[in-house]
Image (tube, rainbow, N blue to C red):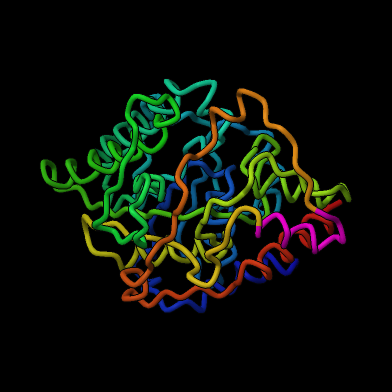
Amino acid sequence: MTCYQEELANFARLDLPWDSLSGCNILVTGATGLIGACLVKALMLNERKDYSVYGMGRNATRAVGLFQDFASDASFHFIQHDVTSPLVSDIDFHFIIHAASNASPNFFSLHPVEVIKSNMNGVDNLLSYGLRHGMKRFLFVSSGEVYGESDGKIFTEDYSGYVDCMSPRSCYPSSKRAAETLCVSYMSEYGAGVVIARPCHTYGPDFSENDNRVYAQFIRNALRGEDIVMKSTGSQLRSWSYVVDCASAILYILLKGKNGEAYNIADEASNISIRELAEITASMVGRKVVMEVPDETERKGYNPVSKSVYSVEKLKTLGWQSTTSIKDGIRKTINYLQSKP
């Protein structure tokens, strides 16, 4: 078992009401993405497991590689499906964690219509299915991008900053905002049990080959023994979270969060600029940071927010705490990926 797997197996020690999952079917959409894959693995490696896990995604080939350790486990199932289409099934999903969303900046630039449809239609299709099939609770993995541009304040869950709705790049934050409202509207009108997670910039093992967010690009540079390539000044201040901490937070929100509430996820000790992230990554492999001019597509996909720093006081009231600093998390990620055949 790798160190990463050991971290996930340790979820069994979290102070959570695991009994509430007993005998249940748990659906994780976006199962082949960074956060979704981590959640699936954590749920499957839990020694208290007496439930079934259904991972849903579009890429069956990637799923085979990610979840090969569970191929012979009768409690694991992979469903190849695109959440933008209605789900046709007779399975009762008691808990649905909706983590499917394209968070690639290039996609925001090239396919903004599809981004909006994915976020809106995905929530609508899954909530309507869940209400017909015994759903107890629905967790929507939203994004800290819903806060928009701040006035310098730390983001608390009741904050709402500026988003330019006339910019195609706003396809992501605007549709995440609307999808959150759709969730609480399902709660208000139909009595659905819903909670919302707002992760900050999340990093860690198992990011896809198509992920072109800055952390993924930096780590690819590091793995190839290259200098870390910056395509901006990197002055933007961000909150960061190691994916294992993010996944544990999602389970706290799912099982202990208050109905109809949103919760930020971040490591308060990992509020650093993108430039600092590049320098940390470069230092891990003895390289330096270099500048490169971005192309037009890359520029269109950039997040314009200058400061995106989150409060997690609300999440802490559920008993959650972060365990991994940004330096340790980047080191763990690089070591894990270097150890893979």
Residue drawn where x is 48% and y is 70% of the image: 268
Name the residue furthest left. 189
As displayed, is residue 323 above or below residue 56?
A: below
For the residue pair 211 and 165, the one nearer the viewer reads as 165
Residue 77 included in the magenta stretch of the image: no
Residue depicted at x 49% and y 52%: 53
Q: Is 250 placed left or right of 210 in the picture?
A: left
**Up-down relation of residue 258 to residue 57 (above or below):** below
Residue bounds of the magenta highlight: 276-288
Query: Is 328 placed above or below 75 here?
Result: below
Q: Position of residue 45 (x, y in %)?
A: 59, 64
Image: 96 above or below 304? below
Percent across and percent down for residue 47 are 56, 72
Q: Is residue 278 magenta?
A: yes
- Where in the figure is residue 300, as x and y percent of width and height? 54, 27
* Among the 4 quarters of the image, the one containing residue 167: top left
The residue at the point 86 percent across, 47 percent down is: 226
